[in-house]
Amino acid sequence: MKTLLPIFTILFVALTALAQEAPAPMLLIYDASGSMWQKLGDETKKVLAAEALSSTVANFSADQPVALMAYGHREKDNCDDVEWLLGLDNTSKEEVIKSVRSLNPTGKTPLARSARMALDQLREQQSCDGDLCQTIAEAQLAGIDFKLHIVGFGIKEETAALRCAADAGGGQYFDASDVDKLAAALQEATRTT
């Protein structure tokens, strides 16, 4: 079975197993780290990302299960601050939207840890985040059949590691410098075939 793993960095990670009949669960891993307080134009990334995600999720089919995990929202310096908020059996889009809007960005950005948790391969690490590209490559080598897309929202620093991870996952890297590009990238990355 082919699995689609769009990763929306500085926003969330989504894991979707493509099923033959009913929609397979989609796992959104939302970035609620301190960087979400940065402004793009007149608004914070927190507000813009919540709006874009809300409109995307609202357009999912009624029977689409959507799980939610978030990181960086409880403790400032905790590299293990990754929490399951809604399980894989959740079909309430309203609960996803409500949960995302209630998050208070606080802490770090453990992308690799979140991806490992999403792939049920979380291992203890010495560093806060680890190597996202290596995490994705290891998942491919372990035989997990998936495709990875990464959307960088308002990222100003070097994106080589994110591009590497998208490439390792057989997907694309999207650069979303504003909310319109974010919404378009979310639509593209979550579109099922």
Image (cartoon, rainbow, N blue to C red):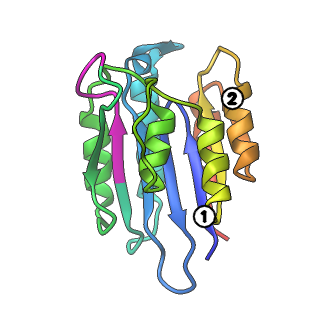
Instruction: Answer with left or right where residue 82 lies relative to residue 110.
Output: left
Q: Main secondary structure of the magenta part?
A: loop
Splitting the image into 4 quarters, where does residue 80 fall? top left
x and y, in percent, of residue 70 in the image: 34, 39
x and y, in percent, of residue 191 in the image: 62, 61
Residue 5 shows which numbered tag?
Answer: none
The magenta stretch is 68-77
**Residue 172 shows in the view:** no
Considering only vertical position in the picture, is 160 above or below 143? above
Considering only vertical position in the picture, is 14 above or below 71? below
Residue count near mark 2 (Cα–Cα under 10 Å), binned few <14, some 14–19, many ≥20: few
In terms of secondary structure, where does tag 1 sit? loop
x and y, in percent, of residue 162 in the image: 67, 32
Instruction: Answer with left or right where residue 53 lies relative to residue 171.
Output: left
Instruction: Answer with left or right where residue 83 lies relative to residue 161.
Output: left
Distance from the alpha carbon under mark 2 to that under mark 1? 21 Å
Q: Which residue is mark 2?
A: 161
Q: Nearer the viewer, residue 4 or 135?
A: 135
| Type of amino acid under label 1 | Ile
In terms of secondary structure, where does tag 2 sit? helix
60 part of magenta stretch: no
73 part of magenta stretch: yes
Quadrant housing the C terminus: bottom right
Residue drawn 60% across and 54% down?
139
Q: Which residue is mark 1?
A: 144
| Type of amino acid under label 2 | Ala
Q: Nearer the viewer, residue 79 or 103?
A: 79
Residue drawn 25% across and 45% down?
98
x and y, in percent, of residue 21 in the image: 52, 86
Instruction: Answer with left or right where residue 43 lies relative to residue 71.
Output: right
Residue drawn 39% across and 27% down?
47
